[in-house]
Amino acid sequence: MLVGRDVERDLITPFVLGQGGDEPVLVIRGEPGVGKTAVLDMAADIAAFHGIRVLRAAALEYEAELKFGALNQLLHPLLSGIDELGSAHQQALNVIMGLAPGAMPTQLIAGAATLALLRAAADQGPALLIVDDVQWLDLSSTMALSYAARRWSGIDIRMLVAVRAEADDGFTRSGFRVHDLSPLDDSNSDELLRATYPALSASVRRRLRDDARGNPLALLELPAAFADGSSPTTLPGVLPLTDRLQRLFADRLAGLPEGTRRMLLFVILAGAEKSMTLQDCAPTSEGRADLPPAERAGIIHVNPRTGMMEFRHPLIRSAVIEQSTSEERRQVHRILAEAFAKEPQRRAWHLGQAAVGPDEEIAASLEALSQQMIRHGDSRRATAAMLRAAELSPLDSDRARRTARAAYLGALITGDLADTSRLLSEATRAEVRETPSLEAAVAAASQLLNDEGDATTAGRLLLATIRVHDRDIGSGQDTMVEALHTLLYVGFFSGRPELWDDINEAIERAKPQPTDTLSLLHNIFVDPVGATQDDLRQLGDALDGLRFTSDPLQIVRVVTAGSYVDRIGGARESLWRVIADGRRGGAIAKAIEALFLIAQVDYFEGDWDELIEVTDEGLQLCAEFGYTLLAGPGRFLRALVDAARGHTAAADLAAEELLLWAAPRHLGTFAAYSSHIRCLAALGRSAFDEAYRHAASINASGSFPHYTPHAVWLVLDLTEAAARSGRVVEARAHAEAAVAAGVSNLSSKLRMLTTAALAITDEHHWRTLFEDALATPDSQRWVFDRARIELLYGERLRRAREPAAARAHMATAAQAFERLQAIPWVERTRSELRAAGKPAPEEIRGSVLTPQEQAVAELAASGLTNKEIAERLFLSARTVSTHLHRVFPKLGITTRSALRDAMSRRLD
């Protein structure tokens, strides 16, 4: 089975079997290495399976001038049939096949003889002719085969030929049908790499996909560059080519003028910054004059969309580099460094590439450049610059520190978590002191936290190293600030109150500026009940400033600071920029966090279908790049939707797995995630005692302790569960504690929830409090929580013997729950409506399926997987999943196993 060639299989199979109409010839056209020969092989296999005779030839470049050379090769298996032909045709073919002396026949006689021989062969059974590399097919063979093909209608013979794109071949000019063979998409490229090289890391596969651009031969050959286990951050800007790739791409450079070859080298080395265009690199008239020969050779072309000149394929860059010497490259870098004398960043980069030995001045410039690149959102090259700075460091201590810093950048930002251990080992070998550098400690802690979830060891390591390096505290060094950021995340995920005394001591000694993201995260994210109005104003200013930055670290940290106080929504555009950068292979780790921050907004604002899509993407990235800890928030948010929609098995499984992973690692936040999922599921089915136990396991009723941020999200859940399970005193204490802790001042959503919690517990003013809750500014924004309050208000009105008013609020709640497909909450609301003396609204399970949903549901009911359905309907597996999530509530089911019976009932 060829990867990603289903379209070609569906095209070629009927053609080979004679079921595709009267077309005698099909031309497969594509770039070198795109898989034309593999497609021809597939056609040959199909023909052989069905008992069709295959006649095959491959044109050779050195035989392009040999008359009838390819025709000789193609017809050779039919030699025995020549004697059955007429004398003129026998004579012509005997000369063509080298069986008799004489002058070569005319094209007309050769074509007619070829047709006669093929007709005779077809009497014995159908045949498939296959000719590869027809760009090198000699003209005589081309004309003979074209003549025969246009005249063999009515006989069971077809011909399949393959040609390079942009070649001037006779079959295309003759008007035969052409199918352009496209490169593989990213998904199929990744599937091919996984199948062929299963040990490659996700970051390496991504780099290979970027360079190969869907070319299957390149995907199969380029991994040789990683044979030593190298990371993509430690490799040059262009990958070395194997011999086969050299033949495909480097040969295009043959015959170019020396000036053009040198100009291309300048273009590649200057344009490595990605901001440079071919025109930028050739600003003079002399430089521009060197480019046309490359354009004529098909090496560069003008992009029709942008009007800019660019390389036709990234691997041509590799070919240019491989045909240059190291001294030529260094010389070009030195010239570029001089040219960019007024641009310190570019000058530092080129000086670093031109250096041949240790040089502290250049190393320091590259280290500074790395920091600037991070702030500008160029995280991948920031790591490369730091590694080059380490290589050029004269002192072992500086080399170790910079290597450790590169390891930290890989773990924190670029997704190179798997490479962190190797870089840390290199840094440790270069250390000359017993105590590890702060850079090494931060890198090691990041790996412990992200890979293994070992917050305890990460915290101990950081605190001990910070104390040893206390002379650096307050110096404003980037590494100290990163150490403290990492320490904050250790404290957040561990959820251990006793750890915060030590963390606060370290932060106090460091005294970062109040506007620093460190202060925002410490004062708001990890301790929202301790946030002041001044803190919230500073957060608002920082969020507003994200419009002007490309730094993924800054964006994600500032937005994270506002996550528990509902300030994410206004930063959607900034988060999507981080996600787009990650999709291009940049800040992978930050893209994962950005996806889950988007998912958090989606949960509270009711866009649950988008939540499913972004969590799917984020969780897949976590699995590919080994970010086990980062997957936690994504699994939690996805499970909340499952719990609300009644997908009990999925929600329970997620809660159980989160708890099992958290328990041995003492990760209190993951335990809170698990309890929150189970609490919501229990509330949906009115199991209030169970819901209370889960909510109270996060924080006891009547208290909102510092450094327990998750408690603010459960203010209504715990109060409702306590009140409905007979714990009236606890319910009242918790609602009042929320007011006393200032929870209602943190956001409009939390004000709405706190007011509703007070309404539940107040025997005298409950009506006013419920009205105030629903009148909270922006309350319509919080779709699910507002619907819950409408339901609670309606339940209270029913108990107060006001059925008409109760029905109005409960009907509003039912509509919102139905829109969200929150089946348990729909059922709970309908039950209350029936108790209020009104039939429930039209059942959601009677809803009409769209044609797309109907098709997906029928295939799923037949037992196909999402991937198989996607292939049948030409959809993505993610889109299939989204359709099924919409279908289940419409059919009144919650599991895939119930789908078959539900679809059968609809037919009845």
Image (cartoon, rainbow, N blue to C red):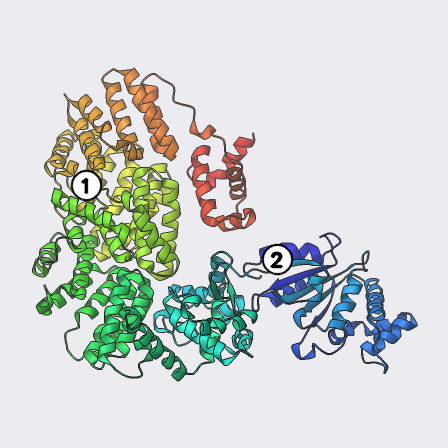
As displayed, is residue 169 above or below residue 773?
A: below
Left or right: 24 as drawn, with respect to 721: right
Residue 596 appears anywhere in the view: no
Which quadrant of the figure contains the N terminus? bottom right
Q: Position of residue 552 (x, y in %)?
A: 29, 57
Q: Is residue 274 left or right of residue 375?
A: right
Residue at screen point 25% across, 59% down: 453
Q: How far, Cα to Cα, is label 1 from label 2?
A: 56 Å
Residue 712's disc is 1
Residue 36 shows in the view: yes
Q: Is residue 488 above or below residue 890?
A: below
Residue found at the far right of this picture: 87
Instruction: Report whether 404 appears left or right of 126.
Output: left
Amino acid at dot 2 = Glu
| Quarter-of-image position of residue 734 | top left
**Mark 1 vs mark 2: which is more N-terminal?**
2
Residue denoted by label 2: 8
Q: Which is nearer the eye, 370 or 803? A: 370
